Amino acid sequence: MAAVTPLTKISGKSETVKTPGSYQAKVRKHKLLVHAAQLAVLTVLIGGWQLFVGNDSRKVILYGKPSGIVNQLHIWVTQGTALGSLGDQIKVTLEEAFIGFIIGTVLGIVCGIALGRIRFLAEVFSPYIKVLNSIPRIVLGSVFILAFGLGIESKILLVIVLVFFGVFFNAFQGVREVDRNLIANATILGGSRWQVTRHVVLPSAFTWIIASLHVSFGFALIGAIVGEFLGASQGLGQLIKQAQGTFNANGVWAAMVIMGVVALAAEFLITRLENRLLRWRPPQLSGPEL
Amino acid sequence: MSTSPQRRGASPAGLAPSAIDLDGVTKRFTTPNGSVYTALSDLDLQVAPGEFCAIVGPTGCGKSTTLTLVSGLERPSVGTVTVHGEPVSGITPGVGFVFQNDAVLPWKSVLDNVALGPRFRGTSKTQANAAARDWLRRVGLSGFEDRFPHQLSGGMRKRVALAQSLINEPQILLMDEPFSALDVQTRAIMSNELLQLWDLTRPAVVFVTHDLEEAIALADKVVVMTAGPGGTVKATYDIDLPRPRVVQEIRFEPRFVALYHQIWEALRSEVDIAYAQTTDVTRAAS
Ligand SMILES: Nc1ncnc2c1ncn2[C@@H]1O[C@H](COP(=O)(O)OP(=O)(O)O)[C@@H](O)[C@H]1O
Ligand SMILES: [Mg+2]
């Protein structure tokens, strides 16, 4: 609104003032349109679902329905779940996912950089890495539960395994992509091998590593949930399994909504971290963002 | 003016060892397809302490390779590289290198980039930063300490690179076509500033360029190399133009023009050979 008032006062400069004002209005209008369309899509989806299921009790069992999901969430929040309070279930799953994510990420970065920087290590370990990477790692969940029991340790291990490889390969590739000029420059400036790794290789590889974290956190949640599925006494995965066992489709959906919220929150934090660590980069995005 | 035949061993002064002494140096590379490529063959070159030496030669004649040998980034296949009387093994101490392409760290601020050398050598952060500010002032970048390299112009980034090298007070400064990516005006300004900075600490300079005018304007000595493969020194020319020089104006002086004509004669035939090779290659490929 402020952009409009000067028009009458500074008559001579009306042309230059007008352009940004109308541009802003255009941008605002466009944003409004996008949001309206998003709302419309949501309404059609949810409303369609609700109408399609209606009060048909067979369909409710098969598909669940939005009002039922909200109801289920309400019950869980106010009365707790069959496994204990809802907060505890979320906490357990998050704990597994986060601890495993952190350990897997750190291990992946350390191993990726070490193998990327030290040719001998890369030569020795490359066949092992290839074999480990080719097996479907989710199966290791069963192995871990047999070996380490139903507690959170087995889930953390599964999460570590799932997270590690993605981060590892990105860190490794990131090291190989470092501009050789930068390494030569830092070396001539007096950097030791470790200093060059710390000041040149690591920051350069971080572009790659951070990109892998978005995907990796998704893997961490999957690992925790699947681990709980395979055998646990607590957690969102177990909650889903119970809901499935009692033909409570609304329960499955409700747990999924919770996980969606958690994943979005984590994504937000990772993006914050990314912007913080990569603020040295020139703005380079073109095309639409997701 | 002297077209000196290649001297072996002793420095021009005859007493102190040369700052740089390449003696019978051959450098071979194994190419990705397994064959061996001789980049330099039997190259002799001496640079005295404090001397400004420019190397000109056609593309691919081994100019950059020569610099990597002096800096210790690469080893010669045959021959010896001696710096201040010491054979080069590992990264040569007391050497600064300004690369053709940007080699400042994009994730560090201008100040941190310039302070990098002292920090690597164990100087405290406060001292390193103070020295870095000092050098940034000398290259005319006061007030840009907190910028990231991508927020600077090409010329400013080159200044950062210069400050980053000079802060280590190198006795030898190697420069690989440092200004080739800059526009003509910026280039002349940077050349002038380089001469002023050089005067502060007087390192021996090896300045690689494909621009003969730039070479003559800056150097005490211009070395013409033969076309590759197996590049070597074709001739050396002493530039007896008085200092201090103003790079933008010196090119109009008769002495400059005479030197230019003389050296261009030697350079042109090598450029022609190199050009013929590339056209041969393209003709063979098509
Ligand atoms: N690491 C390397 N491996 C193989 N060939 C190389 C390598 N470095 C340089 N060369 C070759 O050596 C020759 C001289 O290279 P260079 O010194 O960069 O030339 P200039 O700087 O004079 O243009 C070129 O033909 C180049 O292809
Ligand atoms: Mg070159």
Image (cartoon, rainbow, N blue to C red):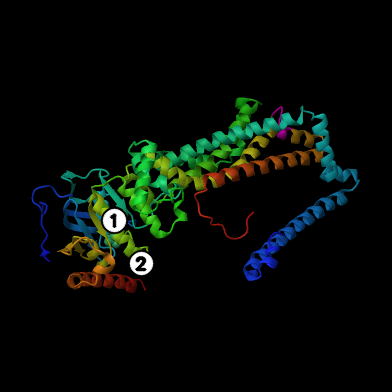
Q: Determine the residue located farthest toward the left in the rendered image.
A: B14
> Along the polypeptide, which appears first: circle 1 or circle 2?
1
Residue displayed at 63% across by 35% down: A97
**Residue name at image x 55 percent, y 36 percent:** A104
Give the CA distance from mark 1 to mark 2: 19 Å
Q: Where is residue B229 in the image (x, y as percent from the top left)?
A: 24, 63
x, y (%) of residue A30?
71, 61
| Above or below for B134 versus B189 | above
Residue B281, picture quadrant: bottom left
In the image, what residue type sits under mark 1? Met
Tell me the number on the disc at residue B185.
Answer: 2
Residue A171 makes an appearance in the image: yes
| Dot 1 alpha-carbon crowd within 10 angstroms: few under 14, some 14 to 19, many 20 or more | many
Give the number of marks.
Answer: 2
x and y, in percent, of residue B34 in the image? 31, 55
Return the residue nearer the eye: B117 or B245.
B245
Magenta segment: does it hold B238? Answer: no
| SS type, badge 2 | helix
* Between marks 1 and 2 in the image, the one whose residue lies nearer the viewer: 2
Q: In which quarter of the image is residue B241?
A: bottom left
Asked if residue A235 is among those painted magenta in the image, a careful observer would answer yes
Q: Residue at x 21, y 45 (%)?
A: B88
Residue B203 is tagged as: none
Please, what secondary structure does the residue beneath circle 1 have?
strand
Q: What stretch is highlighted in magenta?
A: A232-238
Q: Position of residue A157 (x, y in %)?
A: 58, 32
Which chain letter matches label 1?
Answer: B
- Mark 1 sits on what residue? B175
As drawn, A142 above or below A68: above
Q: Is residue B119 left or right of residue A7?
A: left
Direction from residue A9 to residue B222 in the image, left or right: left
